[in-house]
Image: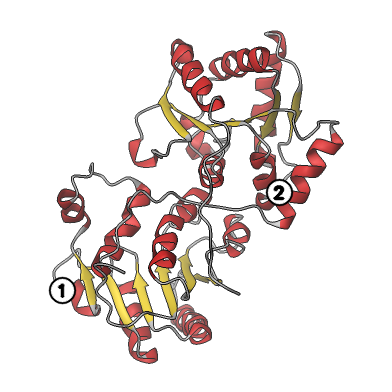
């Protein structure tokens, strides 16, 4: 690939990540996976994820991602010597299964992943890539990228960096750039089966347009991000009347209560034709539900990123300008709308998205089996 600094193409790429186990946090990395696949199509991609929250719901979704050959999760909590030994044993076992010839440390700070990259590179004779954020950190890598602020300044990108751009700091050490790549996700057979069953169960033909709504933000730390329910009701009610849309509410089991509160308001305002899926889907099935929609409206939460990755026309409603979480793809509109006064702007954005037909084509190709 033009500008790439590797003299030989890698065959097995091991990627180290150590951040939150949230759906959006993990899916944000898929644009970088696509860049690696585009650079070296025969190479297989393997994600080694270090987390304090093993067993998170997002793992099932990412484990079946079409761009990954393998996905290993290791509990990085090491409070005792036994924990430390277990951690190294599990990391070594995951890497030994891959036998990487390229190890990429995407983490911008800390020495744990730096040391692991160097150790695994030595163990498997692999080239290593990382980010020289602090003085001396670059010594752990064969190819070291500049710090994130320098990366942003050189490309005239806003600081702090939008989340999807952050993985491209490490990749810049290899000469790989984002070049407009979006995050991505595809339906599995489980998702497709759920999508078809959803329509059959409610007597909806394939041509019947569905409007998805994820109110979300059901955990205590996320409630402040939840959009105004009156605003959402006014928005989706108008869209239903104008376009004959059936409303599909999504949500986790702990978000049943907020969906019920919304439906109480929505019914009083004349809203009709609603399917409430709160607590009725796992993440793989949720992919199918989202993919059935002509438009998906969401708060700043995991399903927002899933819809964007599926290339479903997506309207994200934010209570404040959280621009590091925004996506800027043609099928996405991110709007700051903290009160019902923002309804006209949201309606305009929704109408723009509903006019997108057909959806933007998804990129072709994925690593072989």
Q: Nearer the viewer, residue 180 or 100?
A: 180
Residue at 82% in and 43% down: 197
Looking at the image, residue 73 sits to the left or right of residue 16; the answer is right
- Give the number of marks: 2
Circle 1 — which element? Answer: loop
Residue at 53% in and 20% down: 351
Dot 2 or dot 1, earlier in sequence? 1
Q: Residues within 10 Å of mark 2 (few under 14, many from 20)?
A: many
Q: Quadrant of residue 37?
A: bottom left
Residue at 31% in and 69% down: 1
User: Would you name the residue on which mark 1 appears?
Assistant: 136
User: Would you name the residue on which mark 2 appears?
Assistant: 285
Looking at the image, residue 124 sits to the left or right of residue 364; the answer is left
Q: Which mark is residue 183?
A: none
**Percent x, y for residue 200?**
85, 38
Q: Could you tell me if residue 120 is visible in this image?
A: yes
Residue at 86% in and 36% down: 201
**Percent x, y for residue 228?**
52, 20
As drawn, 245 above or below 293: above
Q: Nearer the viewer, residue 316 or 349?
A: 349
**Percent x, y for residue 298?**
54, 32
Circle 2 — which element? Answer: helix
Q: Residues within 10 Å of mark 1 (few under 14, many from 20)?
A: few
């Amino acid at each position: 690939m033009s500008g790439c600094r590797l003299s030989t193409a890698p065959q097995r790429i091991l990627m180290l990540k150590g951040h939150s186990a949230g759906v959006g946090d993990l899916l944000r990395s898929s644009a970088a996976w696509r860049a690696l696949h585009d650079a070296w199509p025969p190479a297989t991609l393997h994600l080694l994820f270090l987390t304090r929250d093993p067993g998170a719901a997002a793992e099932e979704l990412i484990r079946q991602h079409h761009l990954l050959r393998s996905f290993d999760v290791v509990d990085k909590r090491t409070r005792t010597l036994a924990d430390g030994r277990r951690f190294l044993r599990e990391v070594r076992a995951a890497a030994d299964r891959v036998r990487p010839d390229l190890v990429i440390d995407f983490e911008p700070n800390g020495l744990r992943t730096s040391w692991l990259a160097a150790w695994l590179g030595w163990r498997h004779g692999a080239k290593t890539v990382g980010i020289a954020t602090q003085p001396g950190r670059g010594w752990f890598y064969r190819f070291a990228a500049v710090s994130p602020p320098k990366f942003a300044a050189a490309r005239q990108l806003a600081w702090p960096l939008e989340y999807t751009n952050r993985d491209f700091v490490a990749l810049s050490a290899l000469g790989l750039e984002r070049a407009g790549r979006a995050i991505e996700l595809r339906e599995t057979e489980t998702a497709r089966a759920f999508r078809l069953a959803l329509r059959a169960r409610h007597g909806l033909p394939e041509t019947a347009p569905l409007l998805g709504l994820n109110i979300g933000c059901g955990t205590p730390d996320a409630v402040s991000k939840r959009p105004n329910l009156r605003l959402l009701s006014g928005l989706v009610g108008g869209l239903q009347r104008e376009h004959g849309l059936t409303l599909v509410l999504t949500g986790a089991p702990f978000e049943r209560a907020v969906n019920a509160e919304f439906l109480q308001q929505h019914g009083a305002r004349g809203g009709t034709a609603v399917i409430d899926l709160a607590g009725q889907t796992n993440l793989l099935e949720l992919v199918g539900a989202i993919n059935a929609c002509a438009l998906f409206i969401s708060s700043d939460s995991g399903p927002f990123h899933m819809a964007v990755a599926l290339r479903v026309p997506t309207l994200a409603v934010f209570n404040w300008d959280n621009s590091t979480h925004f996506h800027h793809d043609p099928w996405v509109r991110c709007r700051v709308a903290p009160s019902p006064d923002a309804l006209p702007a949201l309606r305009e954005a929704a109408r723009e998205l509903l006019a997108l037909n057909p959806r933007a084509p998804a990129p072709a190709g994925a690593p072989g089996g």
